[in-house]
Image (cartoon, rainbow, N blue to C red):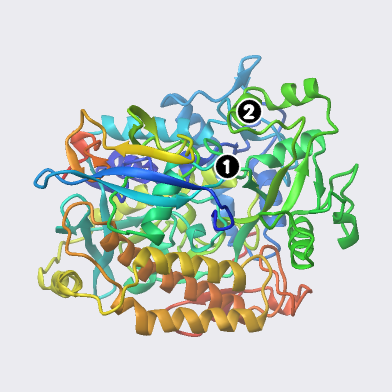
Amino acid sequence: MAEQGLRKATLRIRRGSPNRESRYQNFEVPYEEGMSVLDALRWIRVHLDSTLAIRYSCINANACKTCMAVVNGEVEYTCIAKLTPGVMTVEPLPKRPLIRDLVTDTVPVEEKL
Amino acid sequence: MYAAIAAARHGASVILLDKSLIGRGGATVMAQMTVAAAIGQQEPDDWTIHLADTLQAGRGLCNEELSALLCREGPKRILEMEQWGTRWARENGHIKQETAPGHSRRRCCYVDFLNTGPAVAATLRRKVGEISEIRRISNVTIIELVTKDDRALGAVGVNLNDGEIVTFQAKAVILAAGGLTKLYARNSASANMGGEAYALALWAGAELVDMEFVQFFPIGHLAPRLVGMDPIMWDPFRYKLGGKLLNGHFEEFVDRYGGTDFGQYTATRDVASYSILKEVEAGCGTPHGGAYLDFRHIPEIQLRTAFGPVIDRLLLNGIDLAKTPVEVGPMAHYHMGGVRVNSDMETAVNGLYAAGEAVGGAHGANRLSGNAITEAFVFGERAGTHAADNIKKTKVNWQSKLVEAAVERLKALRARRSKRDVTAAALQAELQNLMWEKAGPFRTGEKLAAALARIQQIQKDELSNVSVTDETSYNLDLQEWFELRAMLTTAAAVVRSALARNESRGAHQREDFPDTDPGFLKNQVLKREGDVARWTAPLKIG
């Protein structure tokens, strides 16, 4: 993705689950112009920490509408939220029950087991 | 979703499962282009003409029974979708239809603006929600099918939300889990396209066909990073406006490879792909390993007219076509091969059906633009209807011991502590690069053999050493381990089939066998994992 880029972005991610106290963890990601926050989250899962829980499906097209999180205080689709060099804070949706890390319960009630 | 609706309509009680959220994962929701069907509203058309176009693109390898079904029933499904609420673009009181490469009539329907996939997915989600006989379950990954005596009896899955194993008892099972383009580093896929339907089918005893035929789209978007758009969006604009393909030194190059590109834009997809990758190989690629697509010679007013609101979406991405060329290159887009079915969509396993892209054979060696969503509708309706009819004459023979082995395997996996620090996500990324470099748009026997050796090594030595944490809640490590297992099986099927086809035809291009050989006018069928394929004559009609 951005191996040749010299600039870095830092994601400050709120992690945790309903039973555990949440904490912020910082991850440094190679930055390339035009990257999305979701690109960075996926890069972290492959290269740094695969235990990070995130929800997404279409990756790029903003068609599935499942990748929402709070980015720097605003609710955004992480697939179209621009990554910027420097520190960005990513948190789970505040009004949905937390499942783990950035994943909240956005499953329609009639689609649950 | 179409299969679920059709099955319920024919009296079945249905469980509709999705690894992500119902109707939001997979490929349909991402489709921005068109749906081809000979409804003849724009100009006189007939399904037999659509069939002739489809067969011509398939280079002699189509299962003509399936191609005919697709073309004959496509119009019914388009009109049914309209009744259910899809707002196809209209003009002068009729559904508007455009042409697309390879179609001899204007027969491609769409929803404005570049919104076909999301719109049809929304229609189907709404329709599914209205039917009380359909029980929807999201976030369950199916890891194995349950069979006995060549009869499908259900499936075993993992609930991503709590890590619990879930077993499903069913008189019939329909695989509608899409294609395999996620096997490739460069793809236009969603997260769910790892080819799991093919692996599940093969493990259950069904057959796969034409696995070597992966469609690569020549001018997929590479850079600058473009979000909120399908990466295969450039084609219609290039044809409409005459976008130039330039190499890394801003020189035209397609003509050097036997295409007649500049001023005419008639270079076929395979020539365009070949010339781009050859330039990259010669050190004349763009920074991201592709070619430039340049619209700077087109007057801005003309750009704005042709692109409509897309031009603003591009500007949001920092792409000003009047000033900057974009980088494009071939990427995996669709799979022509897949699960082998009869005209009822039933596999070699009784009660096991397939629908949509998971089905192999309807497109032969190459698929026409616009035929994929048609296939999702038509084959889904067909599979649902026949599965519902089938179960009326079926007695349940469920035995809980049939799932014990799968449950034990899952428990053992969760209890395992890795000896090595390798994750399924990282191995998936390695597999994607391997497939791209060694089993991609241009193949050689040597590269394919190397790919197969590495896949087998991962299967044998590394898969069982992948670390899977014991986290129960939304454990993607666990989900990705199962994905990886299926991806390896499917990747091996692609590579084996590609290795055995010593010719170039349609989407399968061998640099060591550049010509089409009439002796290979036949399909490859895989029966069991690791077996050598058997060859069959293409199914003809009339």
Quadrant where the N terminus of chain B sits is: top left
Residue farthest top in this picture: B92
From the top left corner, tell me how far across and down residue B54 is, in percent. Answer: 66, 51
From the top left corner, tell me how far across and down residue B50 is, in percent. Answer: 67, 45
> Is there one chain holding both mark 2 and mark 1?
no
Q: Is residue B346 above or below residue A19?
A: below
- Residue B315, label in figure: 2
Q: Which residue shows up at 60% across the image and 79% down it?
A: B448
Tally of marks: 2
Q: Where, by quadrant of the figure, is residue B540 drawn?
A: bottom right
Q: Could you tell me which secondary element the residue under label 1 belongs to?
A: loop
Q: Is residue B153 left or right of residue A80?
A: left
Q: Which residue shows up at 25% across the image and 67% down it?
A: B468
Residue density around tag 2, few if under 14, some if 14–19, many if 20 or more, within 10 Å: few
Q: Where, by quadrant of the figure, is residue B64 drawn?
A: bottom right
Instruction: Confirm whether residue B528 shows in the render.
Output: no
Q: Which residue shows up at 77% across the image and 64% down it?
A: B283
Type of residue at label 2?
Leu
Q: Which residue shows up at 74% across the image and 75% down it?
A: B511
Name the residue that disc number 1 marks: A33
Q: Is residue A29 left or right of residue B88?
A: left
Indicate the chain on which mark 2 is placed.
Answer: B
From the top left corner, tell me how far across and down residue B76 is, in percent. Answer: 51, 35
Dot 2 and dot 1 residues touching (CB under 8 Å): no
Q: CA distance from mark 2 to mark 1?
A: 14 Å
From the top left corner, tell me how far across and down residue B394 is, in percent. Answer: 21, 60
Type of residue at label 1?
Glu
Q: Where, by quadrant of the figure, is residue B202 drawn?
A: bottom left
Instruction: Confirm whether residue B249 shows in the render.
Output: yes
| In the foreground, B279 or B125 | B279
